């Protein structure tokens, strides 16, 4: 695939918008009020890129989204928090 942005190639597009929302979380059998959870508020992907499901390995404040290149595997991971 050509490297120049003006060349003809298979260029994908990803748009991700994150937002914070307040959520209740159960921690050690205690409900914590007003915890902030970062979520994807808008997403768009054009081939050959695809967004996978978001996940929270660092807790609800940091949302991670994996971007996959369908012809060549994972191309990046984005974290917002």
Image (tube, grey):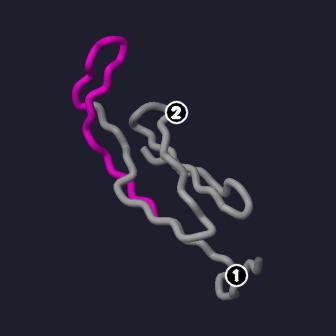
Where does residue 76 sit, x and y in percent of width and height? Answer: 63, 54
Residue 28 location in percent, x, y? 36, 12
Q: Earlier in the sequence, mark 1 or mark 2?
A: 1
Badge 2 density bin: few <14, some 14–19, many ≥20, Cα 10 Å: few
Extreme right residue here?
1
Q: Which mark is residue 57?
A: 2
Q: Name the mark on residue 9.
A: 1
Residue at image point 69% right, 87% down: 8
Q: CA distance from mark 1 to mark 2?
A: 35 Å
Quick check: 43 above or below 8? above
Q: Is residue 46 left or right of residue 27?
A: right
Count up the numbered dots. Answer: 2
Residue 4 covered by magenta stretch:
no
Pinpoint residue 24: horizontal percent, then vertical percent: 26, 29
Which residue in the rendered view is the most extreme toward the left? Answer: 33
Question: Would you say the residues marked 1 and 2 are in contact, meaning their CB atoms lie under 8 Å apart?
Answer: no
The quarter in which the C terminus is drawn is top left
Magenta region, main secondary structure: strand
Judged from the image, the secondary structure of the residue bearing numbered disc 2 is: loop
Give the residue displayed 59% in from the left and 50% down from the top.
77
Q: Bounds of the magenta span?
A: 15-34
Query: Quadrant where the N terminus lies?
Result: bottom right
Taking the spot 39% from the left edge, 59% from the top edge, the residue there is: 17
Q: Residue furthest top?
A: 29
Around disc 1, counting alpha carbons within 10 Å, would you say few (fewer than 14), some (14 to 19), or many (20 or more)?
few
Mark 1 vs mark 2: in front: 1
- Residue 64 in the image: above or below residue 74: above
Horizontal relation, residue 72 to residue 56: left or right: right
Residue 71 image-quadrant placement: bottom right
Compared with 9, 43 (above or below) is above
Checking the image for residue 31, the label placed there is none
């Amino acid at each position: 695939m050509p490297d120049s942005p003006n060349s003809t190639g298979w260029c994908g597009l990803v748009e991700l918008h994150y937002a914070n929302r307040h959520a209740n979380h159960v921690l050690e059998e205690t409900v914590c009020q007003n915890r902030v959870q970062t979520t994807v508020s808008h997403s768009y992907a054009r081939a050959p890129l695809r967004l996978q499901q978001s996940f929270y390995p660092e807790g609800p404040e940091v949302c991670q989204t994996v971007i996959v290149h369908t012809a060549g595997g994972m191309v990046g991971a984005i974290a917002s928090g």
